[in-house]
């Protein structure tokens, strides 16, 4: 895991890491909440893990793992979006939820696009 965190943590949706099948982490790297409810963020992360677990059971899979491309895409998204969202504040002073993409899409809905079956 220390290799995945060098030079900085790289995860998908702050919950999963390529190379670590069946691992779901709540409140992982880049999941900080500056304002608002941490509970809502954790609930969405648990929803994601449950959806992936149900897929494992339904399709009788042994493991499920995020694709390295999805991790890289998410890392690039974070790198590009940070200058646009200094300190995650909007112009009215409210924090932007990290669970949302710039187009307003809930990151937890991206589960099926990023996971690979094994």
Image (tube, rainbow, N blue to C red):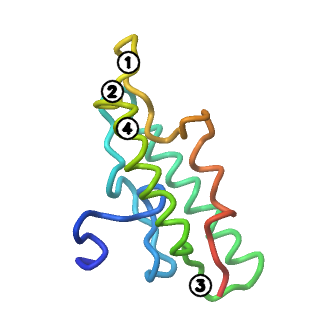
Q: Which residue is mark 4?
A: 38
Q: Where 28 falls versus 115 (above or below)?
A: above
SS class, disc 4: helix
Q: Residue placed at 37% from the left, 50% from the top?
A: 79
Q: Residue at x 38, y 18 (%)?
A: 94
- For the residues marked 3 and 2, what is the alpha-carbon distance in whole angstroms? 35 Å
Q: Earlier in the sequence, mark 3 or mark 2?
A: 2
Residue placed at 67% from the left, 77% from the top?
56
Q: For residue 63, which numbered disc appears in the image?
A: 3
Give the numbered dot on residue 22: none
Disc 2 residue crowd, few under 14, some 14–19, many 20+, Cα 10 Å: few
Numbered mark located on residue 94 in the image: 1
**Viewer-closest of 84 and 70:** 84
**Quadrant assignment for the C terminus:** bottom right
Along the horizontal axis of the image, is 42 left or right of 93? right
Q: CA distance from mark 4 to mark 3?
A: 29 Å
Sequence-first tag of 4 and 3:
4
Horizontal side, residue 72 vs residue 59: left or right:
left
Asked if the residue under mark 4 is in contact with the one under mark 2, i.e. CB atoms within 8 Å, the reply is: no
Q: Which mark is residue 35?
A: 2
């Amino acid at each position: 895991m220390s290799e995945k965190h060098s030079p900085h943590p790289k995860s998908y949706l702050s919950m999963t890491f390529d190379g670590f099948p069946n691992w779901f982490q709540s409140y992982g790297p880049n999941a900080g909440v500056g304002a608002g409810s941490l509970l809502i963020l954790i609930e969405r992360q648990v929803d994601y893990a449950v959806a992936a677990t149900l897929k494992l059971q339904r399709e009788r899979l042994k493991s499920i793992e995020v694709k390295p491309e999805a991790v890289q895409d998410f890392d690039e998204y974070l790198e590009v979006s940070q200058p646009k969202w200094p300190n995650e504040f909007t112009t009215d002073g409210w924090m932007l939820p990290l669970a949302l993409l710039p187009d307003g899409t809930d990151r937890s809905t991206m589960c099926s696009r990023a996971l690979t079956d094994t």
